[in-house]
Amino acid sequence: MPEPLVGKRIVLGVSGGIAAYKAIDFASKLVQLGADVHAILTASACEFVQPLSFAAITHNSVHTSVFEGWEGEHSGHVTLAATADLVIVAPATANSIAKIAGGFADDMLGAVLLATQAPILIAPAMEHRMWHHAATQANLETLRSRGVRVISPEAGRLASGAAGDGRLAAVDRLLAEARCVLGAGGVLNGKRIVITSGGTHEPIDPVRFIGNGSSGAMGNALAQAAMDAGAEVTLIAGPTVATLPIGVTPVRITTALEMQSAVQAAIVDADALIMAAAVADFRPAHPSEHKLKKNPDENTQQLELVKNPDIIAGISQPGLVKVGFAAETDDLIANATQKLQAKGLDLIVANDAVATIGASHSQATLLIPGHEPESLAEMSKEDLAGVIVARLAEIFARQVIS
C-alpha cells in the first residue's frame, strides 16, 4: 500500500507561539514521507522562526502575506486553497483559533482557511489557563461543528515553566493524524480490523514465564498500513510490544487466554481479524504463586504443560475475514496449506520461523484458497504489511461481487 502522504499537497499554517520551532521538524517529517509542503507563516510566527527555514526544508516558497502571488484573477490564497489536499495549523495559538472561528481573513492563513475545501487539522499550543478558558473552548467547539479536526495538546512542562496541558502534540502524533485524514478514502475505508501483535507470556511463577522473542513489529506494521488505508484498527498487543502505533484502539494482554478473551470481544462488530501475534502453544498447568527455589540436590525440574487454545481456529463468525500466519522451520508451503484449510482462513502468510522472529525484513509466501501461492521477495515488514492489506482489500471486493 502506498504511503498516504506521498504526492499530497499539504498547506502548513504556523501561528505565533514558542512551539513554532517544532513546526520545522514537522514540515521536515512530512517532506520525508513524500508530501509537497507549502508553509504559511503569520506575522507573529515570523518573530519566532524564519521563513527561510521552511523554504530550505520544503523546497517551496513560504507565504507570509495575503498580497503575495496575485496573477490577474487568480490570487495566491485562492490557488493555494484550491490545490491543497490537507490544511494543518500547527501550532494554533489561542489568538489564531479565535480568528479562525470568527472567519477572519486579514492574513494569508485566514484567507486560505476560508477558501479551501480541503480537510482542516488544527493543533493548539498555549499556556494551560488559556487552553482551558471558556472562550478558547467555545471557539474550538465552533470549529469542530464545522468539521475541523482538533488535535488536543499534551500535558507537560510549558514555556512559562509551569506544568499542565497546552504543549503542542508530538510530531509523531501530528503525522498520524495527517495520515489518518488522507487515508480516509483508502481501500479499507469504513472497515473495522482487529489485529493481534507480539508474543504472550505464560507464567511459571511470579517472576518466570514461557515466551518468545516476537517484537510485535509485524503486527504494528499491519496496524499502521490498515489505518493508512482508512480502516479503524483495534490492536491487541502482548507484553513484548513496547509501543503501539498512534491511532489504534489499544488492548493490552499478557497470556494466551487473555488474548483469546480480548479477540472474542473485539471481533463482535469487526470485518476482519489478522492474527499476527506469536501466541504460546502451551502454558504451565500449575503456575506457582511463589517464586520457585532451586533445590541443590536436584539437577532437573519437571514442568507440566497444557495446550493453549488455537484462537483463530475457534472463531467461526459469519462474514469475518480471517488472516493467519504460519511460521515454519520446514515444509513451509505444505504446513501452511494445511493450516489454511484446517482453520478456515481466507489468507495465510507463511514464512521461515527462525529468519522472521526479531528481524526487520521478511520473505513470505501468501496463500489464498483457490489461488496459486504468491511468493514475495524479501522486503521490510512495513512493505509486507502493505501487500497483506492490499490482498485483504481484494478479498473484501470479492465478497461484494459474490
Image (cartoon, helix red, strand yellow):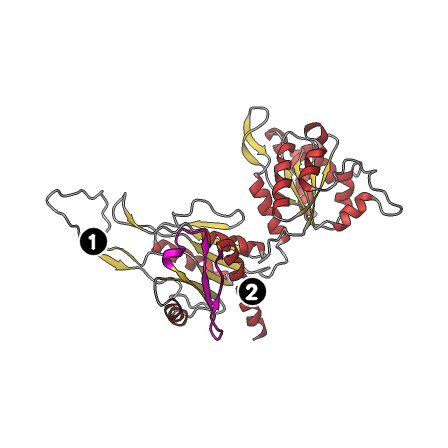
Vertical side of 277 occupied by 294: above or below: above
Q: Which mark is residue 303?
A: 1
- Label 1, residues with CA under 10 Å away: few <14, some 14-19, many ≥20: few
Q: Which mark is residue 392?
A: none
Please tell me whether residue 359 belongs to the stretch shown in magenta: yes
Residue placed under numbered mark 2 in the picture: 393
Q: Is there any visible trace of residue 312 in the rendered image?
A: yes
Residue in front for this viewpoint, 256 or 317 = 256
Q: Amino acid at mark 2?
A: Ala
Q: Quadrant of residue 157?
A: top right
Q: Secondary structure at mark 1?
A: loop
The percent coordinates of residue 378 (x first, y second) are 48, 58
Vertical side of 225 occupied by 149: above or below: above
Left or right, 353 with reference to 164: left
Q: Amino acid at mark 1?
A: Leu
Residue at the spot x=59%, y=24% of the render?
A: 160
Q: Is there any visible trace of residue 278 in the rendered image?
A: no
Q: Quadrant of residue 324?
A: bottom left
Disc 1 + disc 2, Cβ < 8 Å: no
Q: Which residues are magenta?
A: 353-379
Residue at the spot x=25%, y=46% of the render?
A: 205
The percent coordinates of residue 256 (x first, y second) are 35, 55
